[in-house]
Amino acid sequence: MKAQPIADVYSDYLLASFGATTATGLSQRLEGEVSHDQGTRYLAGQKKTAADLWLTVKAFVRQVQSEAGVLIIDDSIAEKPYTDENDIVGWHYDPSKDRLLKGSNFLTAWYGSQGVRLPVGVHWVAKTEK
């Protein structure tokens, strides 16, 4: 296998997998060419930010950028009914269901142009007041 950055290998594994995914599963799928320790170290490493996402996709955005391009902003709630409340998991109003949901609220930004849609930003909403 040609050497690829662990981020590329792991994201491909997540996209291609059905069901549970683990660093050990990645290692098994690649017949030991990537150790489970490499996967674990990557996941436990430095926290990724929206700026890291932008640096990753910027070159692709520039390839499809056009006057007709659009920026799409979406807010979503990932339901987490069984998770303890914290700064990220809490109660949020979901207008599509007309009720409160326990979960994580996040914003995503996408750039769309020439039939391509690329993620360009993400922000997790942290509640500072109860």
Image (cartoon, helix red, strand yellow):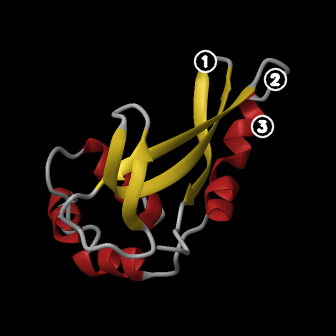
Quadrant position of residue 94: top left
Contact between labelled residues 1 and 3, with CB atoms less than 8 Å apart: no
The residue positioned 21% from the left and 46% from the top of the image is 17
Q: Is residue 35 left or right of residue 74?
A: left
Mark identifier at residue 62: 3
Residue at (69%, 57%) from the top-left corner? 55
Residue 101, percent from left and from top: 32, 50
* Distance CA(mark 3)–CA(mark 2): 9 Å
Q: CA distance from mark 3 to mark 1?
A: 14 Å
Helix, strand or loop at label 1? It is loop
Q: Earlier in the sequence, mark 3 or mark 1?
A: 3
Residue at image location 52% in from the left, 80% down from the top: 46
| Residue type highlighted by circle 1 | Gly
> Considering depth in this image, is 72 or 116 the residue closer to the camera?
72
Question: Could you say where residue 10 lies in the image, as x and y percent from the top left?
Answer: 36, 59
Q: Which residue is mark 2?
A: 66
Q: If the image is split into quadrants, where does the N terminus sit?
A: bottom left
Amino acid under disc 3 = Arg
Q: Secondary structure at mark 2?
A: loop
Q: Position of residue 100 (x, y in %)?
A: 34, 49
Residue 49 lies, with reference to residue 15, above or below; the image says below
Residue holding disc 1: 115
The residue nearer to you, when weighing 98 against 49, is: 98
